[in-house]
Image (cartoon, rainbow, N blue to C red):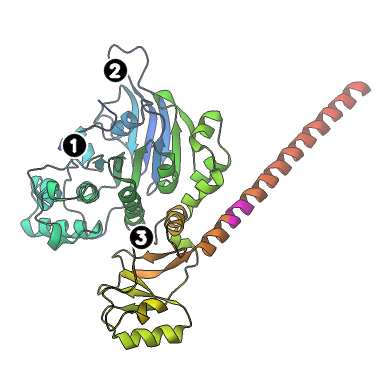
Amino acid sequence: MSETSETSTTTTVPEEAPSPHATTGATIELEHLTKRYPGSSDPAVDNVNMEIKAGEIVIFVGPSGCGKSTTLKMINRLIEPTSGRIRINGEDVTDIDPVRLRRKVGYAIQSSGLFPHMTVAQNIALVPKMTGWGKQKIKARVEEMLDLVGLDPGEFHGRYPRQLSGGQQQRVGVARALAADPPVLLMDEPFGAVDPITRDHLQDELIRLQHELHKTIVFVTHDFDEAIKLGDRIAVLRERSHIAQFDTPEAILTNPADDFVSGFVGAGAALKRLNLTRVRDVEMADVPTVTVDDPLQTIFDKLRASGTNELLLLDKRRRPYKWLRRGDLMRAKGSLARAGTLVHDTVTRDATLRDALEAVLTDNAGRVAVTGRRGEYTGVVDMETLMNSVQEMLEADRLEAMEHQHELEEQRAQLTHQEQEGHAGEAKA
């Protein structure tokens, strides 16, 4: 069985409805955590010690079979530790009832694990219903969670999992894991079974959710680029979950601990740093916008007044719809139905600069529209902005390397001076 295979029977079980004030993250401490399976000479997980701060995203990354998923599952005791301790917010949970523990821990897995015979609403409401919540409270919570993960409650409430795309199923899986407002969310390669474009969007959605919720998230992946994009800190794990390096993405990229970690970083560390900067962190350009409800003459007048050669046409919900150039308007003949070029790709404010660069490179005009939570237009990122950001990163790397080299030279000089003083002392003696 693969590390990520799991049934959906491990749904979080809350004790009571969330309070009006959402629960934020909890600290997690792993002390000498070990797992031995009968008949195996070596432990699957060996003496792991780790402290995870409240409200941060920590990524476990390592080769297949290194024990990262086993370590994750011991946190909520889906796999029982052989020895060691687990503390959540200071409480030793190693010896308490596992069901009680899982009331504090959300769990999301690959392929969502939704019950196929239940609707979306029933999947999300399952645990609140089991714990005796009232119907109105359950209904309100389901709507709140669907809205939180960007799914229209009216549209998705009554659907079955088979009627959803892979990305939509994963969103519902996350909504179910968060339904009880747990302080801790465990995610075991949750986006591994979807296509790359959907995966990027789900990653952006998780980043957005974390900005709102501030949960403690422990996330397993084999994809180092995903780890850089999502993690506040990354634990690079060797066999038996031995920690090769546990640090920020920036520190691992610029100063990998050894050759094993360097192998995970791979080539192009400077470009990988594009995954550390979000679109919201750079200055966005703006282009004149019009809507599908504007009269054609108004659109002509706005283009003429703007002094540019291009407008962005927004739909009724102010989402990017078409790029309109002067020539397109001249050929419109009273209708925009066939005029312009459809907007095929956008990025969110939480997308990384790497996401934006990929989108810009596939666009003939070298720009991409940026959208907010509901897909509404917020600005444009172009090639010039991205290239300036890359240059700033490269310059920062160069200065950091020079500073590090200067520190090494000072240390060598100090050691040489101490050795010389020692020899001088011996000579006098």
Q: Do the residues labelled 1 and 2 touch (CB within 8 Å)?
A: no
The type of residue carrying mark 1 is Thr
From what the image shows, is residue 235 above or below residue 200? Answer: above
Question: Which mark, by number, is residue 228?
Answer: none
Front residue (pair 148, 89): 148
Q: Mark 3 points at which residue?
A: 345
Q: Could you tell which of marks 2 and 3 lies nearer the N-terminus?
A: 2
Task: Give percent across and percent down for residue 6.
Answer: 21, 33
Per the rendered image, the range of residues in magenta is: 391-396
Q: Mark 1 points at which residue?
A: 10
The type of residue carrying mark 3 is Asp
Q: Judge the density around disc 1: few (<14), some (14-19), many (≥20) Cα neighbours within 10 Å.
A: some
From what the image shows, is residue 156 above or below residue 7? Answer: below
Mark 1–mark 2 Cα distance, whole angstroms, equals 21 Å
The type of residue carrying mark 2 is Tyr
From what the image shows, is residue 8 above or below residue 276? Answer: above
Nearest to viewer (mark 2 / mark 3) = 3
Question: Which mark, by number, is residue 37?
Answer: 2
Front residue (pair 403, 50): 403
**Residue 324, located in which quarter of the rendered image?**
bottom left
Task: Give percent across and percent down for residue 71.
Answer: 34, 30
How many circles with numbers are drawn on the protein? 3
Task: Give percent across and percent down for residue 236.
Answer: 45, 34
Mark 2–mark 3 Cα distance, whole angstroms, equals 48 Å
